[in-house]
Amino acid sequence: MRARSAATRAGAGAVSPDSGGCGRGEVRLGRVWAFREGERYILNFPTKGHWRSASRLPDIAAGLESLVAVVGELGIGSVAVPALGCGLGGLAWADVRPLIESAGARLPGVRVVVHPPQEPVLPFPRAVLSMGAAGIPSRDE
């Protein structure tokens, strides 16, 4: 799940500076920031230092170490993990998956659900092709 869809499901405060964590520097690369939302915990896992930057495997590995520690400290019984750093972060799932699986193996008794990457619904090149096919004039017409 991408950050925007996570914010939509969890509420805007989950990842916005207004929640306090970003503004106070609590949300940092390589460190999971957790807060309680009703009966659940929301675990923010930054995957890159700037939204335009690419994700880096060492940052994902450091974040997973933090995830293991936070899940253990809070006694969380299940956690869903998306394809961290894949997609817009630019990392290959083949490189990220073993890191996630290794972290999950260090969480005995915790149900770890890994969500592999999915193709975006409308990646930009296809959206342009679809618009042209739908009768919307392109620059060439």
Image (cartoon, rainbow, N blue to C red):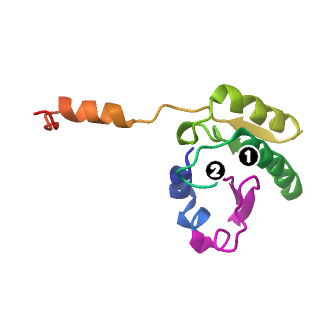
Residue 26, percent from left and from top: 73, 67
The reply to whether the magenta stretch includes residue 34 is yes
Q: Which residue is found at the position 13% from the left and 37% from the top?
A: 137
The picture quadrant where one finds residue 122 is: top left
Name the quadrant of the C terminus: top left
- Determine the residue positioned at 31% across, 35% down: 127
- Numbered badge on residue 117: none
Is residue 22 within the magenta segment? Answer: yes
Report the amino acid beneath label 2: Lys
Residue drawn at x 63%, y 37% is 83
Q: In this view, does 39 lie to the left or right of 71?
A: left
The residue wearing badge 1 is 59
Q: How far apart are marks 1 and 2 (CA)?
A: 7 Å
Q: In this view, does 124 lie above or below 73?
A: above
Tell me if I can see residue 77 in this picture.
no
Q: Is residue 72 left or right of residue 1?
A: right
Q: Which residue matches tag 2?
A: 48
- How many labels, in total? 2
User: Of residues 112 and 138, which is closer to you in this image?
Assistant: 138
Which portion, as a residue range, is magenta?
17-46
Q: Residues within 10 Å of mark 2 (few under 14, many from 20)?
A: many
Kind of element beneath mark 2: loop
Residue 2 position within the rendered picture, expressed as x and y whole percent measured from the top left? 55, 46
Give the residue displayed 67% in from the left and 25% down from the top. Answer: 94
Does label 1 or label 2 sit earlier along the sequence? Answer: 2
Residue 100 location, quadrant: top right
